[in-house]
């Protein structure tokens, strides 16, 4: 794991957003808000999170914001979710489970098409997707749909793709080892811009 500063968890709901609360949802983690280009999760945009594998538990990074968003009237959708995310959302007691939706695409419909449609609809505040494929065009299409639907799209991919060109403007990489975990902000070429240790 690269040497980076410690990531402190604070109650970010009591703190003003760097970019203005009308444009972002605070992550619930102050230093992560400071790392992200907009000062939090964008309310209308796409974030790519690169994980070591499908068993990695990314929920500590997402749960503070998802709890808050689940109380605001629009759905949180999961397209082809992995077990750690599905279990995390359905067992978290602070989540409004009436607003959580799991979608497994119908045969003949790709996860990409499903996520794109749900982002575009405006019915969801968050759409998390595991499309099992990845292209630069895919990222651009999802970003356009997220902007139209005023939704946060979270696209998950796996270790090794960070060196590929990406159409997603905000990219994070979660790294795990015996020392713990760390999150890194990447550019579109996969180069590390900054990083923080998670404690």
Image (cartoon, rainbow, N blue to C red):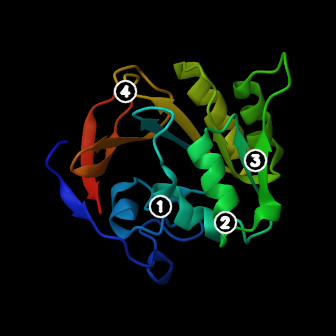
Disc 4 element:
loop
Please tell me how crowded label 2 is: few (under 14), some (14-19), or many (20+) other residues with Cα within 10 Å. some
Image position of 66 (left or right of 102): left
Seen in the picture, residue 22 relative to 111 is either above or below; the reply is below
The residue singled out by tag 2 in the image is 69
Residue 37 drawn at (x, y percent):
40, 53
Q: Which of marks 3 and 2 is nearer the N terminus?
A: 2
Please tell me how crowded label 1 is: few (under 14), some (14-19), or many (20+) other residues with Cα within 10 Å. many
Confirm whether residue 74 shows in the render.
Answer: no
The residue singled out by tag 3 in the image is 149
Q: Quadrant of the C terminus?
A: bottom left
The residue at 36%/71% (across/down) is 9
Disc 1 element:
loop
Instruction: Kindly indicate the quadrant of the structure image that contains residue 160.
Output: top left
Residue that sits furthest to the left in the current view: 3
Residue that sits furthest to the bottom in the current view: 14
Residue 44 drawn at (x, y percent):
63, 51
Q: Residue 179 carries which label?
A: none
Instruction: Calculate the distance from the C-alpha at mark 4 to the C-alpha at mark 1.
Output: 21 Å
Determine whether label 3 and label 2 are within 8 Å by CB: no
Instruction: Calculate the distance from the C-alpha at mark 3 to the C-alpha at mark 4.
Output: 27 Å
Seen in the picture, residue 170 relative to 166 is either above or below; the reply is below
Disc 2 element:
helix
The residue singled out by tag 1 in the image is 40
Which numbered mark, 2 or 1, is in the foreground of this view?
2
Instruction: Calculate the distance from the C-alpha at mark 2 to the C-alpha at mark 1.
Output: 13 Å
Residue nearest the viewer, comparing 112 with 90: 90
The residue at 51%/33% (across/down) is 54
Q: Earlier in the sequence, mark 3 or mark 4?
A: 3
The residue at 41%/21% (across/down) is 165
The residue singled out by tag 4 in the image is 162
């Amino acid at each position: 794991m690269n040497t980076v500063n410690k990531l402190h968890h604070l109650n970010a709901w009591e703190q003003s957003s760097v970019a203005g609360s009308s444009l972002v949802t605070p992550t619930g983690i102050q230093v992560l808000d400071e790392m992200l280009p907009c000062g939090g999760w964008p309310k209308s945009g796409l974030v790519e999170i690169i994980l070591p594998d499908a068993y990695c538990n990314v929920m500590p990074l997402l749960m503070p914001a998802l709890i808050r968003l689940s109380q605001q009237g629009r759905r949180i959708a999961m397209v082809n979710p992995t077990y750690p995310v599905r279990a995390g959302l359905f067992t978290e007691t602070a989540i409004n489970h009436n607003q959580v939706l799991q979608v497994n695409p119908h045969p003949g419909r790709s996860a990409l098409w499903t996520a794109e449609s749900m982002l575009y609809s405006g019915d969801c505040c968050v759409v998390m997707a595991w499309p099992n494929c990845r292209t630069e065009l895919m990222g651009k299409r999802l970003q356009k749909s997220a902007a139209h639907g005023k939704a946060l799209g979270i696209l998950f991919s796996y270790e090794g793709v960070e060196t590929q060109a990406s159409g997603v403007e905000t990219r994070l990489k979660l790294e795990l080892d015996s020392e713990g975990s760390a999150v890194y902000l990447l550019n579109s070429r996969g180069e590390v811009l900054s990083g923080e240790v998670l404690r």
